[in-house]
């Protein structure tokens, strides 16, 4: 879709972003502002501004009218800046401790001024280095339970919910997910990216009709089920952590979708890290201990999520069907089954699709990396095809352990 630029839009640079800070009176002394462009994601400019004397710092994030990862040949809506800031503001209504504070937004410039989280690290980096985060599972499980429940029909008046569905209608970013997660990896399409050594394993996926049918069915859920407001891209690169704090960032893919989607992406990315640790941690004992920690993150996140969701259902459910315990079971069971299928698609696309993960790609032993990726593809494919048959979180974890 063509992106029409508003007159006011101009990409910022390290000089003009200081002018913006001055206009907004964000600091007291503009002679001594240090600016760095630190964006390492696929899509945006991210400036960190630090006032030398006081150490006060802020982040200015600006959407570019194209996907940075590919270049200007891939135009992309600036409206994603509105979606991201609106979702941060919405999340702050029920979980302010888990999102960066938004100070200012400008829709014409497609920018958001927000809290600097440089005391935190990106979770993916921390996991690759084998760091444990004792509160991660509790924080993510609680955040997901609250954000799903408080934005769903179980809690909101139907008019309010439908207004939010409109606010968070995000067709261009959803199309990226529809293509890159649910379609392209299952067909011979030129966005895919994998070495020739994987060709045989990938051809097997492309020839697997049942796998393609299950992926199509998951895509259909993604297309049609406006159940709750999602983050939309909850991989471990979208989470900032310290030992005690967890913050979800980069919610430009937010939209109303199926409830199992976010937790699936979180679990899939933890599973990929788990698989990669046989190459990152050489000491057997330390590796096994770290891998057990990763599995405990999955189990504890799921248990925290379900306990919290049940509590909200019981104490804050407004929709009359929340009085039916059988319906509560039906909803949680469907979130679980959807989660497994979505996690399978994420694992596959992060291995052979356009956007990979550092956990796997940084493995220096090339043959080892290829063999591991084959096992990861099998894991993803098993999850997509067997989702209905996996009955509980322990069975789901058993698959991860077997990679
Ligand atoms: C062109 S965007 C590629 C990927 O980066 C984002 O973080 C999403 O995961 C998207 O699929
Ligand atoms: Mg991102």
Image: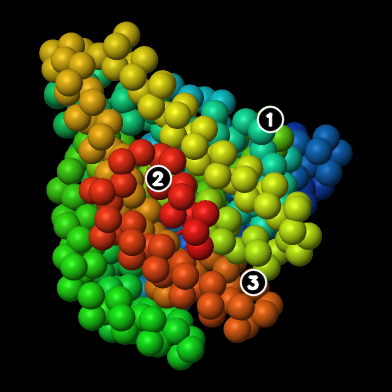
Camera-nearest label, 2 or 1? 2
Q: Which residue is the site of mark 2?
A: 395
At horizontal 58% and vertical 57% (from top left) the residue drawn is 273
Q: Position of residue 236 (x, y in %)?
A: 54, 51
Image height check: is 132 above or below 96?
A: below
Q: Can residue 81 be seen in this view?
A: no
Q: Relative to residue 364, is residue 142 depicted above or below?
A: above
Q: Mark 3 points at which residue?
A: 362
The N terminus, quarter of image? bottom left
- Mark sitting earlier along the chain (2/1): 1
Q: How crowded is mark 2: few (under 14 residues within 10 Å), some or many (20 or more)?
A: few
The answer to whether the beta carbon of the residue marked 1 is less than 8 Å from any atom of ligand 2 is: no
Task: Assign a secondary structure to mark 1.
Answer: loop
Residue drawn at x 27%, y 64% is 182
- Indicate the quadrant of ligand 1 in the picture: bottom left
**Which percent across, then down, holds residue 122?**
63, 50
Is residue 374 rendered to the left or right of residue 382? right
Residue at horizontal 23 percent and vertical 75 percent from the top: 208
Q: How far apart are marks 2 and 1 (CA)?
A: 29 Å
SS of the residue under disc 3: loop
Is 322 left, or right, of 110 in this rendering?
A: left
Q: Crowdedness of circle 1 by 10 Å Cα count: few (<14), some, many (20+)?
A: few
Residue at the limit of the structure toward the bottom, as seen here: 196
| C-beta proximity under 8 Å, tags 2 and 3 | no
The x and y percentages for residue 86 are 38, 37
Q: Which of 121 and 133 is in front in this view?
A: 133
The residue at which mark 1 appears reads as 244
């Amino acid at each position: 879709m063509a992106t029409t630029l508003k007159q006011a839009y101009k990409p910022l640079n390290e000089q003009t972003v200081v002018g913006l800070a001055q206009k907004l009176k964000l600091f007291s002394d503009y002679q001594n502002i240090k600016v760095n462009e630190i964006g390492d994601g696929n899509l945006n400019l991210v400036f960190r501004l630090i006032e030398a004397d006081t150490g006060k710092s802020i982040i200015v994030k600006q959407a570019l009218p194209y996907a940075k990862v590919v270049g200007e040949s891939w135009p992309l809506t600036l409206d994603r800046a509105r979606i991201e800031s609106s979702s941060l503001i919405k999340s702050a209504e029920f979980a302010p401790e888990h999102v960066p504070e938004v100070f200012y937004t400008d829709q014409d410039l497609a920018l958001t001024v927000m809290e600097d989280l440089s005391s935190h690290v990106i979770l993916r980096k921390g996991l690759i280095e084998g760091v444990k985060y004792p509160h991660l599972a509790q924080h993510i499980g609680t955040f997901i339970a609250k954000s799903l429940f408080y934005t769903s029909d179980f809690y909101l008046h139907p008019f309010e919910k439908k207004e939010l569905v409109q606010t968070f209608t995000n067709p261009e970013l959803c199309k990226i997910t529809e293509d890159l997660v649910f379609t392209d990896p299952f067909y011979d399409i030129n966005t895919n990216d994998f070495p020739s050594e994987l060709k045989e394993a990938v051809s097997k996926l492309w020839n697997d009709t049942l796998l393609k049918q299950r992926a199509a069915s998951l895509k259909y859920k993604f297309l049609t089920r406006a159940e709750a407001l999602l983050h939309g891209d909850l991989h471990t690169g979208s989470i900032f952590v310290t030992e005690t704090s967890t913050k979800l960032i980069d919610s430009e893919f937010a939209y109303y979708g199926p409830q199992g989607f976010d937790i699936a992406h979180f679990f899939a990315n933890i599973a990929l890290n788990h698989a990669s640790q046989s190459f990152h941690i050489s000491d057997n004992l330390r590796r096994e201990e770290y891998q057990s920690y990763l599995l405990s993150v999955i189990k504890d996140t799921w248990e925290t999520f379900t306990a919290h969701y049940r509590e909200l259902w019981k104490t804050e459910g407004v929709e009359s069907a929340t009085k039916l315990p059988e319906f509560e079971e039906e909803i949680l069971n469907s979130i679980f089954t959807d989660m497994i299928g979505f996690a399978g698609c994420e694992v596959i696309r992060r291995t052979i699709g356009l956007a990979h993960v550092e956990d796997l790609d940084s493995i220096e032993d090339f043959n080892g990396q290829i063999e591991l990726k084959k096992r990861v593809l099998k894991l993803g494919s098993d999850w997509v095809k067997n989702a209905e048959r996996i009955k509980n979180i322990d069975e789901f974890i058993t698959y991860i352990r077997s990679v």
